């Protein structure tokens, strides 16, 4: 059976939260200079916010009976087949490695972009699953 939902990796989110919590504790207890304390505190807040938002938006993309469910920070958007104009992979080189993005063009001219972090796997695998489900290949 092929995978039908994709989300950021649980271990990665937990590691971001743990590092953020460690930095917050360090900013309050260990760092003695004021600028260092402020920078560590801002970094801790950023990591904790990123982990919270990543956890909240799980699963990021899912194939459901109603359509393709895209979950964001504040809610879920369901795209039916007529709502999807195109699904494609964009690939480019960055820092001597290939980066792939899954892009979904909607009929209302919005573009949804998913990274490997968002999907928890290679975007090519997700494109294959969406093609098998009848969403891609238009």
Image: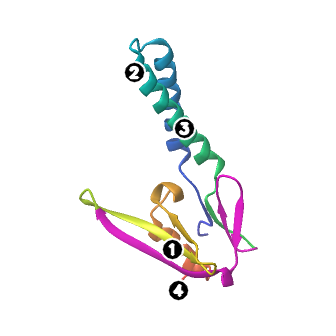
Q: Quadrant of the C terminus?
A: bottom right
Residue 23 image position (x, y, % from top left): 47, 25
Dot 3: element:
helix
Residue sitting farthest toward the front: 35
- Point out the tag, 2 or 3, that comes first from the N-terminus: 3
Q: Nearer the viewer, residue 90 or 119?
A: 90
Q: Which residues are magenta?
A: 66-93
- Percent from the top left, x then y, of residue 13? 54, 42
114 above or below 58? below
CA gap, disc 2 and disc 3 = 27 Å
> Alpha carbon of mark 1 to alpha carbon of mark 4: how far?
9 Å
Return the residue at label 1: 127
- Dot 4 falls on a residue whose secondary structure is loop
Mark 2, residue position: 35
Report helix, strand or loop for mark 1.
helix
Q: Residue at x 47, y 66 (%)?
A: 123
- Secondary structure at badge 2 equals helix
Which residue is depicted at the point 58% across and 78% down? 109
Q: Position of residue 85 (x, y in %)?
A: 58, 83
Q: Earlier in the sequence, mark 2 or mark 4?
A: 2
Q: Which mark is residue 14?
A: 3
């Amino acid at each position: 059976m092929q995978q039908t939902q994709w989300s950021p990796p649980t271990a990665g989110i937990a590691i971001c939260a743990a590092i953020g919590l460690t930095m917050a504790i360090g900013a309050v207890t260990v760092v003695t200079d004021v600028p260092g304390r402020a920078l560590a505190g801002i970094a801790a807040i950023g990591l904790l916010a990123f982990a919270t938002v990543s956890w909240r938006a799980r699963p990021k993309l899912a194939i459901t009976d109603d359509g393709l469910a895209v979950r964001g920070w504040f809610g879920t958007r369901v795209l039916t087949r007529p709502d999807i104009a195109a699904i494609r992979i964009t690939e480019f080189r960055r820092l001597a490695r290939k980066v792939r993005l899954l892009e979904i063009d909607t009929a209302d001219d919005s573009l949804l972009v998913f990274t490997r972090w968002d999907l928890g796997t290679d975007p090519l695998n997700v494109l294959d699953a969406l093609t098998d489900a009848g969403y891609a290949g238009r």
